[in-house]
Every structure is written in structure tokens, then in C-alpha cells.
Amino acid sequence: MSSETYHTAKDSFFVNSSEHIQIEVLHYPPINKTQNYPPILFIHGGFLAAWSWDDFSHWFSDKGFDCYAMSFRGHGQSTKTPNKDKWWSLNEITQDISAVTDEIIARTKVNPILVGHSFGGALLQNYLEDNHQKVSGGVLLASPSPYLHKTSFFKVISNIISSHQIFPYLKAIITSNPYATIETPELMKKLLFSSAYPDSMAREIHPRLEKFGFLSGFLELTKPFVDPSKIKCPMIVIGAEEENASFDNVKVLSETAKVYGVGYDIVGAAGHEIMLDLTWEDAAKIVFDRIQERIINK
């Protein structure tokens, strides 16, 4: 289903972050304002921007949520700093989440639910360590485990080598740019989408991706990047059935869910880019049900 099915409005604004960076925020006001739902902030992963949450944001605003989607520095319409975009630290990038969350609280007077995808999920956990009291709950979609540095990271490296995907990764290392791993529609589809995702759609979406990745931030995931014991808000953990072979999907999900004391869900027939793949609406329904269960009706 396309976001064009919905008739929700959309506007945009900018929020000041650290280092004089302006962060793009897309806003999708709720259709049914009688629902007493917390607002939702959607946080994208690598190579994406706020636009990648368009279907999710329309879907949830149609259900009565006040929805926001942000673009990290260097992404979408947020401020670009070509000489530094790859080199921002995890904590510097996390300042973008902090600035936008504070703005949403100021506008709505309600603590939002934060939904982080992939690298955005790692950043969300980093943010929640010291700011969990500012949110109603956190949702991790295809997110790294907080123990990536000592368990699943080594499995990732082993699987990359055994699946003969080493050459794009070697190019990424040589060029200091993670984009090399997805620099063609074919590589992007293989790494990020389900097997059923049409080649025509892959060719259409590929030019919208950012041509760089947060190299410094990514490398920081190979060491402890969060103390999950400090995160006290409700957490939701969701993964994709067709997560790329480079990742041990069940291991990542189970160790993430265990540390937060919850179970986990897997979206059927979805690749890593859960909110953009063909079964995105199935994923939205799972997120909606878990939010109802663990945050709204807890």
C-alpha cells in the first residue's frame, strides 16, 4: 500500500542541533485527534533520511498519532558538512535526536515514542541511556544489539567472508565510505531488501540514498556504545525475516530482547529496510500492536 492511499497532511520544519547544524523534521498531524496517543518520532538508519518513513508516518497519523520523522545531519535536507559528514562521533550524531525530541516535547507537552531503525536504533539506545525519562518508550527495528561489540559483530564478519561479499566491504574500507557496500541497485537490494522486492523498485529508490555513511559512528559500534541497564523505559524489539545473510538475525534479536526483558517479533518476508519493503504495512501493524500492549495500555 502506498502513502498516497492516506489523506493525512504533511509539513516540515527545522530544529537547531549541536555544531550549528539544522535538522530537517517532517510532521504528519493526526487525523483523529480524539485519540490520546503519545507523539511518535521516527529515526532513520544509514543512507536514508526522513522521507524513508513516509508510509509509516501516514499510516500511524491515520490511526491518530502525531508523527514526526527526522533527518540526521548530512542527510535529507539537514545541514551538510562535506568535510566532516563521515566523521561525526556517535555522541555528536545523538545530539540530533536530543534536539528533535526536546522540540517535540515543547510542542506537544507529551513525551514521545521513539522508533529507531538499524543504525538509528543504535543511536536511539545511545540517547536513551541518559534520556529514557523523556520518552514514553523505544522501538528498535532491525537494530544492532547493545552487545554487538562482543558477540554478533564477529558473526557479521564471518558471514561476510563466507558469503563472498567481501569485495564491496574491502572497497568500503579502502575508500573510507560504507556506501561502497550498496553503490549499485543490485548490491543495495541484496543487502537491504527482500528477495521479492522488484528490481524496478530498487532502481527507482537507489538514487535517493545518501552517498556516504557515518564511518566514525559505525566504527564506535565495535566497542560498548550503551549501558542497557540504565534504560528504564518500555522497549520493543522487531526484526526482519529476510535480514541479509551477513547478519545472524535471531542472535541479534534474542540478545537485544533479553537485555531489555522483552520478547521480539519478526516481520515476515521483509528485508532489512523494513519500512520500505513490500510488507511494510505488516510491520506497521506489529509496531502498533506492541505500542498498544507495552506503552499505551501497560
Image (tube, rainbow, N blue to C red):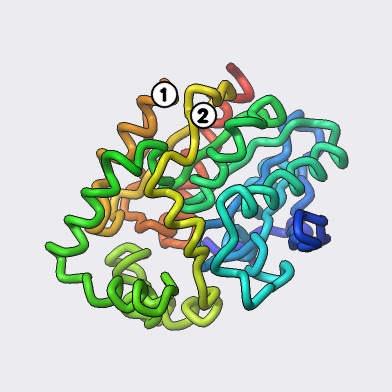
Residue 257 appears in which quarter of the rendering?
top left
Pointers 1 and 2 in contact (C-beta within 8 Å): yes
As rendered, which of 141 and 58 lies closer to the eye?
141
Where, quadrant-wise, is the C terminus in this rendering? top right
- x 43%, y 82%: residue: 203
Return the mark for residue 262. Answer: 1
Q: Secondary structure at mark 2?
A: strand
User: In the drawing, does residue 206 fall left or right of residue 11?
Assistant: left
Residue 20 appears in which quarter of the rendering?
bottom right
Crowding around mark 2 (Cα neighbors within 10 Å: few <14, some 14 to 19, many 20+) is many
As rendered, which of 175 and 35 lies closer to the eye?
175
Instruction: Name the residue furthest top.
Output: 298
Residue 223 appears in which quarter of the rendering?
top left
Q: Give the answer, above or below, for where 254 lies relative to 47.
A: above
Q: Give the answer, above or below, for where 205 lies relative to 27.
A: below
User: In the drawing, does residue 269 fall left or right of residue 118?
Assistant: left
Q: Locate residue 208, reporting x and y percent.
A: 55, 77
Residue topped by disc 2: 235
> Can residue 198 be spotted in the picture?
no
Crowding around mark 1 (Cα neighbors within 10 Å: few <14, some 14 to 19, many 20+) is some
